[in-house]
Amino acid sequence: MVARLLDEDPEGAYGYSRVALRLASRVAAVREAAGFAAYANQKYGEALAEFRAAKRMTGNIDLWPVMADCERGLERPEKALDMAGAPEVHKLDKAGQVEMRLVAAGARRDLGQLDAAIVTLQSPELAANAVQPWTARLRYAYADALLAAGRESEAREWFAKAVEADRDGSTDASDRLAELDGVEFVDAMAGDADEVENDQVPASDTPKADEVEDEGENDKD
């Protein structure tokens, strides 16, 4: 239930995770699920504690990037950067290393180090033409960092590249690109409502009560 509700109803997922913890707190998967539920609800201290517990139980370091992001959520970007340089990062798979790079870049931005954030994201994975599960998010983060640094033309280029890679709509890169191009979206439903209202019969054309009665008497005659 936590996994099913996490995206659409994070509060509901969190409620189920608390029940699971009461029933099976010694199960690593339960602690991990509880961590993600707390993370989705921005309860970063609680999430970090659950992720640490899951890591102790399994010895698995896959949660290292999200643990570092919890440090950012707790307003400790320096700690997140320390974790980005830790030996555990070298044990992560490619997806985990890219995620760690994203977290490190975010920590640099938290510290106001925009140029360092941009450099952090510059990597073989960013330059690769092949689309991987992380490609859209990596390109998006790079474009966003460029835009924050005032490099709008470069940001536009990378938002466009993010759109190309974002096959499942995991980012709002298309909206950001349209915003840079000055495109304004119109609510089509609002327009339809106006047309329906305009198509209604004017009050002056509505038969009056006495006219209806006269027509009825004429019918009788």
Image (spheres, rainbow, N blue to C red):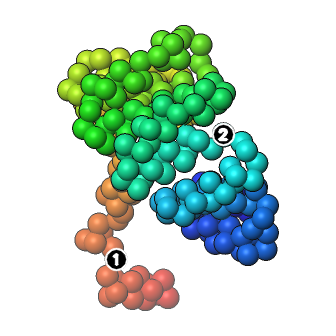
The x and y percentages for residue 140 are: 43, 29
Foreground residue, 129 or 102? Answer: 102
| Residue at figure coordinates x 70%, y 60% from the top left | 31
Q: Residue at label 2?
A: 62
Q: Nearer the viewer, mark 2 or mark 1?
A: 2
At label 1, the amino acid type is: Pro
| Residue at figure coordinates x 64%, y 30% from the top left | 92
Q: Looking at the rendering, in which quadrant would you find the N terminus?
A: bottom right
Q: Residues within 10 Å of mark 1 (few under 14, many from 20)?
A: few
Outermost left residue: 150
Q: Which image quarter: residue 54?
A: bottom right
Does any portion of residue 150 appear in the rendered image?
Answer: yes
Left or right, 153 with respect to 13, comes to left
Foreground residue, 81 or 122? Answer: 81
| Residue at figure coordinates x 44%, y 38% from the top left | 82
Q: Residue at label 1?
A: 207
Does any portion of residue 189 appear in the rendered image?
Answer: no
Which of the numbered marks, if any, corresponds to residue 30? none
Q: Residues within 10 Å of mark 2 (few under 14, many from 20)?
A: some
The x and y percentages for residue 17 are: 68, 67
Please determine whether, in this image, residue 60 is positioned above or below residue 190.
above
Sequence-wise, which precedes: disc 2 or disc 1?
Answer: 2
Q: Secondary structure at mark 1?
A: loop
Outermost front residue: 87
Foreground residue, 171 or 19? Answer: 19
The x and y percentages for residue 138 are: 48, 27
At label 2, the amino acid type is: Asp
Please determine whether, in this image, residue 153 is positioned above or below residue 49.
above
| Residue at figure coordinates x 73%, y 44% from the top left | 59
The x and y percentages for residue 155 are: 31, 23
